[in-house]
């Protein structure tokens, strides 16, 4: 075994799973683009302050999970733990937000120093979207429906949508008051983190991962609905009604708060029963105050992020990956050493046409080459040896019906050009 191993909580994505990842990412890209989203790629490393200000200083992510360190000039930098803050930073820096609605999607690695377990890693990947420039509840419904339809498009059955609202500032302040009062009465039962956060950021008590803390409010949670302003109530009701009209089922979950500070109004999470205790496939919500708090103009916004590893688990990654090993259009067999170079030269011309070709650059037994040709699932094999050289041809074998015929270089190029059309 190698002395140097990958870091705990990081994972190499190897073939054949990597081809399933590529396939899923391709479909996801197409899906997001159908809804008018444009790709954005932000750096993996950012100033630490970005996340402290946006995600919130009392959250688990910022307090315990960030990969934060000083660079060589002593500046505090952080490997991004999520994408929203980065997209907001980029959108403000490059003045992408204005009068019209802007929609961005991203995919890539995120970093959180968590205890690794099934479905929880320290480097993981997210597929995410952010829509800026609208306060409409219909945008929330569209965002949720886009997520649900994405899973359907990928053939993933059995997802559940949990939904809640945090209302506007006024509603949330009222709710925090009610919650704080209730929490104070149970102060001794909470873990030290919750006790510390109670006065500073009481909402975080609802997403504490300590089981005994979760028990406290389990059957006795004050309802946010009692605290909602008329406007916030109407917003939420409109989201639910639109989902009903779209035929999207959901479960209202009053205890859902999500672990980041920037949410307002609608929040949601999608779970899948194949995922065990880490059952959240993805989540998101509206964040109307974030852009302004980061120095921009008031801008309504809504988005979500999906965990790619969990998506792959839910899609029963391994089994499907084996099925989806991409077949090359053609495998080239070299019967003698001279043929290796001749095949390489022809493969170069074929690939320029867009044909995918497998060819070995070194000597191997003919038997082994045919074994690999079969495994590659290529529908055609081109064979070159002494006999073919003497005639100036290749033998083209159709693997499906086992027929074989001789073709010149030009005929081979014309044949495959036609095939891949
Ligand atoms: P969040 O940004 O916390 O709302 O996470 C969104 C989604 O990312 C979750 O629902 C998970 O699917 C995924 N996720 C978050 N943290 C991890 C992690 N440590 N390992 C794997 N996936 C994660």
Image (cartoon, rainbow, N blue to C red):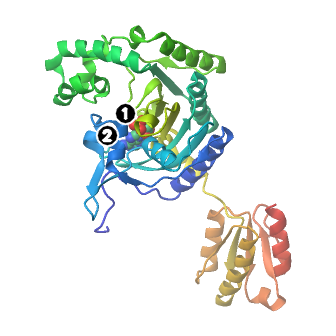
Mark closest to the chain's N terminus, 1 or 2: 2
Q: Residue 117 occupies which quadrant of the picture?
A: top left
Q: Within 8 Å: ligand 1 and the Cβ of disc 1?
A: yes
Q: Does residue 286 lie above or below 18 as drawn?
A: above
Residue 188 position, x and y percent, is 13, 19
- Say few, some or many: other residues with alpha carbon within 10 Å of mark 1 (under 14 / 14 to 19 / 20 or more): some
Task: Find out whether the residues at labels 1 and 2 contact each other: C-beta distance under 8 Å.
Answer: yes
**SS of the residue under disc 1:** loop
Q: Within 8 Å: ligand 1 and the Cβ of disc 2?
A: yes
Q: Which residue is mark 2?
A: 61
Ligand 1 image position (quadrant) = top left
Residue 150 position, x and y percent, is 60, 36
- Say few, some or many: other residues with alpha carbon within 10 Å of mark 2 (under 14 / 14 to 19 / 20 or more): many
Residue drawn at x 30%, y 27% is 204
**CA separation in Å, label 1 and label 2:** 8 Å
- Say the numbered circle drawn on residue 260: 1
């Amino acid at each position: 075994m190698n002395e140097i191993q990958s870091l705990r909580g990081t994972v190499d994505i190897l073939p054949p799973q990597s081809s399933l990842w590529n396939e899923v990412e391709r479909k996801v890209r197409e899906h997001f683009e159908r809804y008018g989203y444009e790709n954005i790629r932000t750096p993996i490393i950012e100033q630490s302050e970005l996340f402290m200000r946006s995600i919130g200083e009392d959250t688990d992510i910022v307090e315990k999970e960030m990969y934060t360190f000083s660079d060589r000039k002593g500046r505090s930098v952080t490997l991004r733990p999520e994408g929203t803050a980065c997209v907001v930073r980029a959108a403000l820096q490059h003045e992408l937000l204005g009068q019209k609605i802007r929609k961005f999607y991203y995919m890539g690695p995120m970093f959180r120093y968590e205890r690794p377990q099934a479905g929880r890693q320290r480097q993981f990947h997210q597929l995410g979207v952010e829509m800026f420039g609208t306060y409409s509840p219909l945008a929330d419904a569209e965002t949720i429906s886009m997520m649900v339809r994405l899973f359907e498009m990928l053939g993933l059955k059995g997802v559940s949508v949990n939904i809640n609202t945090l209302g506007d500032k006024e509603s949330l302040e009222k709710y925090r008051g009610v919650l704080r009062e209730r929490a104070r009465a149970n102060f001794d039962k909470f873990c030290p983190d919750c006790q510390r956060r109670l006065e500073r950021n009481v909402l975080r008590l609802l997403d504490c991962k300590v089981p005994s803390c979760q028990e406290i409010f389990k059957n006795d949670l004050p309802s946010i609905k009692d605290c909602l302003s008329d406007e916030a109530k109407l917003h939420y009701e409109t989201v639910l009604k639109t989902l009903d009209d779209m035929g999207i089922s959901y479960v209202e979950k009053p205890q859902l708060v999500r672990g980041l500070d920037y949410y307002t109004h609608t929040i949601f999470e999608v779970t899948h029963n194949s995922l065990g205790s880490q059952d959240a496939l993805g989540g998101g919500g509206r964040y109307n105050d974030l852009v302004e708090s980061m120095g921009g103009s008031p801008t309504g916004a809504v988005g979500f992020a999906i965990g790619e590893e969990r998506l792959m688990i839910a899609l029963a990654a391994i089994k499907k990956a084996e099925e989806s090993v991409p077949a090359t259009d053609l495998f080239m067999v070299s019967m003698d050493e001279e043929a290796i170079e001749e095949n390489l030269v022809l493969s170069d011309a074929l690939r320029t046409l867009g044909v995918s070709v497998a060819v070995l650059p070194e000597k191997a037994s003919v038997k082994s080459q045919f074994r690999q040709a079969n495994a590659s699932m290529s529908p055609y094999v081109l064979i070159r040896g002494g006999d073919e050289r003497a005639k100036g041809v290749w033998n083209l074998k159709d693997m499906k019906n086992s027929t074989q015929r001789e073709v010149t270089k030009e005929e081979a190029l014309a044949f495959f050009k036609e095939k891949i059309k």
